[in-house]
């Protein structure tokens, strides 16, 4: 059974960098044919796909965040991470990590419980 | 690729049938629509993928159908644990998008 768990600070100051880590158990982040994704949900709003990193370490980002976003893989720790620079209050959200399949199976089959990140001074 | 879900909220009683709609702004290739259930404090749960395939462990009271731009999630006989918010998602496009959700109140 694959499990994902988000970790990181729950409070970030405006203009600083938001850093989150997702630890994966029950499976390897470097095994083929999976993408490792971040999805967020601002308070009272819908889910928003943020981006993913492939099993080979290649990232893809949603266009609206691309200039501020880095998603990377750490195979030695079986983790992947998100860094979002120059945050504002609009980046306050519940952040989820999830596993996405490949090609025709590119839906999110395993998710973490989510971590609430508030951007405030 | 915009997904529009309706209704925004469904208020139903246990034993009733729930029908949730998801309409896409363009045709969804290969019926690449998934449905998820979200509850506070829990990891989101994949219910349906490929528009109509139930994910592992999902009860058969959950069913999905549709093609082109119109998709439906049906819960045939609601149980109290089915409350939550349901989202559809398309994965036909490289930029994944979600609908705005339907809240099911029991």
Image (cartoon, coloured by chain):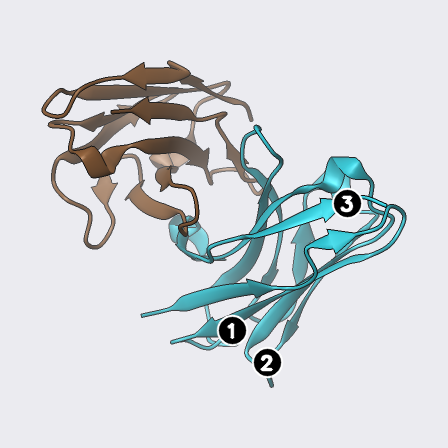
Q: Earlier along the polypeptide chain: callout 1 or callout 2?
A: 1
Marks 1 and 2, how far apart in space?
Answer: 6 Å
Whether labels 3 and 2 share one chain: yes
Element at label 2: loop
The percent coordinates of residue A13 (x first, y second) are 84, 50
Q: Which chain is cyan?
A: A
Residue at mark 3: A119
- Say which mark, if any, is on residue A75: 2
Front tag of 3 and 2: 3
Residue B77 percent across, percent down from the top left? 11, 28
Q: Residue furthest front?
A: A121
Task: Determine the colour of chain B.
Answer: brown
Q: Horizontally, is A90 left or right of B98 in the view?
A: right
Q: In terms of secondary structure, where does tag 3 sit?
A: strand
Q: Look at the numbered disc 1 and give the secondary structure of its residue.
A: loop
Q: Are marks 1 and 2 in contact (CB under 8 Å)?
A: yes
The 10 Å Cα crowd at callout 1, few under 14, some 14 to 19, many 20 or more, is: many
Q: Is residue B70 left or right of residue A59?
A: left
Of mark 3 and mark 2, the one earlier in the sequence is 2
Give the image location of residue A69, x and y in percent.
77, 53
Subunit ID for the residue under disc 2: A
Alpha carbon of mark 3 to alpha carbon of mark 2: how far?
29 Å
Can you identify the residue that label 1 sits on? A29
Image coords of residue A32 (percent x, y): 46, 72
């Amino acid at each position: 059974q694959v499990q994902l768990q988000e970790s990181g600070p729950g409070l970030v100051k405006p203009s600083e960098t938001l850093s989150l880590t997702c630890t994966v158990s029950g499976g390897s982040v470097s095994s083929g044919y999976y993408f490792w994704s971040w999805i967020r949900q601002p308070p009272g709003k819908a889910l928003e796909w943020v981006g993913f990193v492939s099993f080979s370490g290649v990232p893809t980002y949603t266009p609206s965040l691309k200039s501020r976003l880095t998603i990377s893989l750490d195979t030695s720790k079986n983790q992947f991470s998100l860094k979002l620079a120059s945050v504002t209050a609009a980046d306050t959200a519940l952040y989820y990590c999830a596993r996405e399949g490949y090609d025709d199976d590119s839906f999110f089959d395993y998710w973490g419980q989510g971590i609430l990140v508030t951007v405030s001074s | 690729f915009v997904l529009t879900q309706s209704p925004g909220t469904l208020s139903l009683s246990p034993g009733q049938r729930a029908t949730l709609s998801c309409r896409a702004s363009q045709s969804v290739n290969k019926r690449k629509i998934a449905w998820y259930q979200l509850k506070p404090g829990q990891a989101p749960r994949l219910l349906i993928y490929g528009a109509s395939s139930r994910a592992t462990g999902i009860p058969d009271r959950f069913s999905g159908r549709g093609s082109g731009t119109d998709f439906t999630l049906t819960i045939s006989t609601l149980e109290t644990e089915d409350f939550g918010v349901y989202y559809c998602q398309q994965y036909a496009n490289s930029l994944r998008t979600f609908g705005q959700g339907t809240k099911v109140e029991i």
